[in-house]
Amino acid sequence: EVKPGTGLVLVDIDNLLADYMSQISARTAAKVAENITQIKLNNIDLIYHINANASVIEGPSAGSAMTIATIAALQNKTINRDVLITGTIENDGSINSVGGIKEKAIAAKDSGASIFLVPKANYLGDYEEVKACKNIGKTEYCQVNYMPKEGALDKELGIQIVEVGRIEEAIPYLIK
């Protein structure tokens, strides 16, 4: 929620028990949204209403979602409900890794999402061995790399998973 005010960032958790990381994520989301939209927040209060099917929430996993919600609210735009996102948000707008990606992808699919955005650092698909060899003189040198197979987790779970490294990469998917 965005309303005239004095620059407060408030987190309404109602009947939930939340740790301090949720509050830090809200503050970081506000800063990143201010930088992206170029809308100064010194005369605006931001209120994050968190409703969850849980009694306890913890960690910074919702930071990227909070940032997207803030950008959309500041720009008076709507959020695409067919796409969900997880990932911590950093002050520079980068999206970093979180735990439980597979479980979150299942929950996203169960909630009706067709696309689930995850941090690039969290790829959980299958890997294939790629071997590159080079002859130098009479000696063959080989290097083995393990490269992600595109779409492996997508196929397993039945939801399109897209990796994003920065909040700017997520905006076209989520904000209308």
Image (spheres, rainbow, N blue to C red):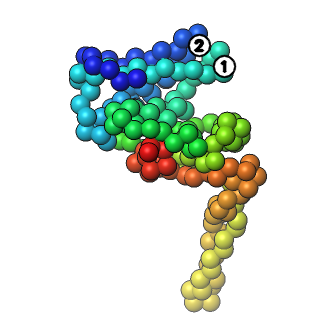
Q: Is residue 42 left or right of residue 145?
A: left
Q: Residue 155 in the image: x percent, y percent?
A: 73, 56
Q: Residue 121 in the image: x percent, y percent?
A: 55, 48
Task: Assess disc 1: are there few (<14), some (14-19) or many (≥20) residues with their C-alpha within 10 Å of its C-alpha.
Answer: few
Q: Which mark is drawn over residue 54?
A: 1
Q: Quadrant of residue 129?
A: bottom right
Task: Determine the residue positioned at 23% across, 23% down.
Answer: 42
Dot 1 amino acid type: Ala
Q: Of the residues under marks 1 and 2, which one precedes in the sequence? A: 2
Task: Assess disc 2: are there few (<14), some (14-19) or many (≥20) residues with their C-alpha within 10 Å of its C-alpha.
Answer: some
Q: Is residue 2 left or right of residue 148?
A: left
Task: Determine the residue positioned at 32% across, 20% down.
Answer: 3
Question: Which quarter of the rendered picture does the C terminus lie within?
Answer: top left
Dot 2 amino acid type: Leu
Find numbered disc 1 in the image and state the secondary structure of the residue it sits on. Answer: loop
Residue at the right extreme, as displayed: 156
Q: Which mark is drawn over residue 65?
A: none
Question: Which quarter of the rendered picture does the N terminus lie within?
Answer: top left
Q: Answer yes or no: do the residues labelled 1 and 2 have beta carbons within 8 Å? A: yes
Q: Is residue 110 left or right of residue 62?
A: right
Residue closer to the observer: 47 or 140: 47
Q: Residue 68 in the image: x percent, y percent?
A: 44, 37
Q: Residue 66 in the image: x percent, y percent?
A: 46, 31
Q: Quadrant of residue 5?
A: top left
Give the CA distance from mark 1 to mark 2. Answer: 7 Å
Find numbered disc 2 in the image and state the secondary structure of the residue it sits on. Answer: loop
How many marks can you see? 2
Task: Determine the residue positioned at 69% across, 53% down.
Answer: 154
Q: Which residue is mark 2?
A: 16
